[in-house]
Every structure is written in C-alpha cells, then in structure tokens.
Amino acid sequence: MTPDGGVLFFQALYSPRGGCAAASVLRSFYVKLGPDGLPVAGQTARMLLSNLDPSHAVMTPSLSPDECTLYLASDKDGGQKLYSAKRR
C-alpha cells in the first residue's frame, strides 16, 4: 500500500478463463482506494503486466520507499527473477 493509503498492491491466484476453481497462477494487481480505505466506486482492481502471457507468475509487488520504483518477481524468463519499473 502506498503511504497515503491511496493505492493497494496485492497478489492473487488468477485464471485467464475466469473462475476461482481454475485459478492456478499468482498474478499481481492494484486498486485505488478512497479515504474510507475501500476501492473507489466504479473502479476494479487492474492487473500489473496484463500483456504478459497468463501462464507466467507475477508476484510480490512492492514500492520503493520514495514510491518511484515498483518491484516484482516473475518466472517469465525461467526461474524466479526480480524486476523493477521506474515511475514514468
């Protein structure tokens, strides 16, 4: 979660076919939160790296202390690796 409580990053089991029973790959998501700590009305969680093949895990989303870099782990290139993305 960002220090101001405005954005929550989380991971959950995911299936591109939908439905919890078929979910088998960890993917990372984020959702904007309102002042009450609940998702902003009308907004749903969005997947990080949604263009990545759904068979690849995207896990443990974390922000740097200055909130300018997002870190995550993935098995995209075979084996677990840590990736980072700077804020645009």
Image (cartoon, helix red, strand yellow):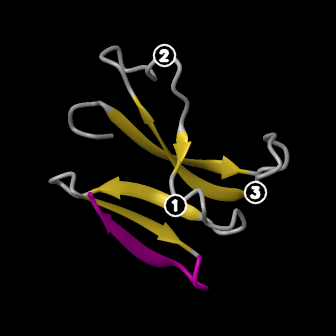
Q: Which residues are magenta?
A: 76-88
Q: Give the number of the mark in front: 2 or 1.
A: 2
Q: Residues within 10 Å of mark 3 (few under 14, many from 20)?
A: some
Q: Quadrant of the N terminus?
A: top left
Q: Quadrant of the C terminus?
A: bottom left
Residue highlighted by disc 1? 59
Residue 41's label in the rendered image is 2
Is residue 43 shown above or below 35? below
Q: Residues within 10 Å of mark 2 (few under 14, many from 20)?
A: few
Numbered marks: total: 3
Q: Earlier in the sequence, mark 2 or mark 1?
A: 2
The residue at the point 26 percent across, 58 percent down is: 87
The residue at the point 52 percent across, 60 percent down is: 59
Check disc 1 and give the amino acid type.
Met
Check disc 3 and give the amino acid type.
Ser
Check disc 2 and give the amino acid type.
Ala
Apparent side of residue 79 relative to residue 22 in the rendered image (left or right): left
Q: Residue furthest left?
A: 66
Q: Residues within 10 Å of mark 1 (few under 14, many from 20)?
A: many
Q: Is residue 85 magenta?
A: yes
Q: Earlier in the sequence, mark 1 or mark 3?
A: 3
Residue 61 at x, y = what percent?
42, 56
Q: CA distance from mark 1 to mark 3?
A: 13 Å
The residue at the point 27 percent across, 40 percent down is: 2
Q: CA distance from mark 2 to mark 1?
A: 26 Å
Apparent side of residue 36 relative to residue 58 in the rendered image (left or right): left
Residue highlighted by disc 3? 24
Task: Determine whether the residue tagged by mark 2 lies in a helix, strand or loop.
Answer: loop
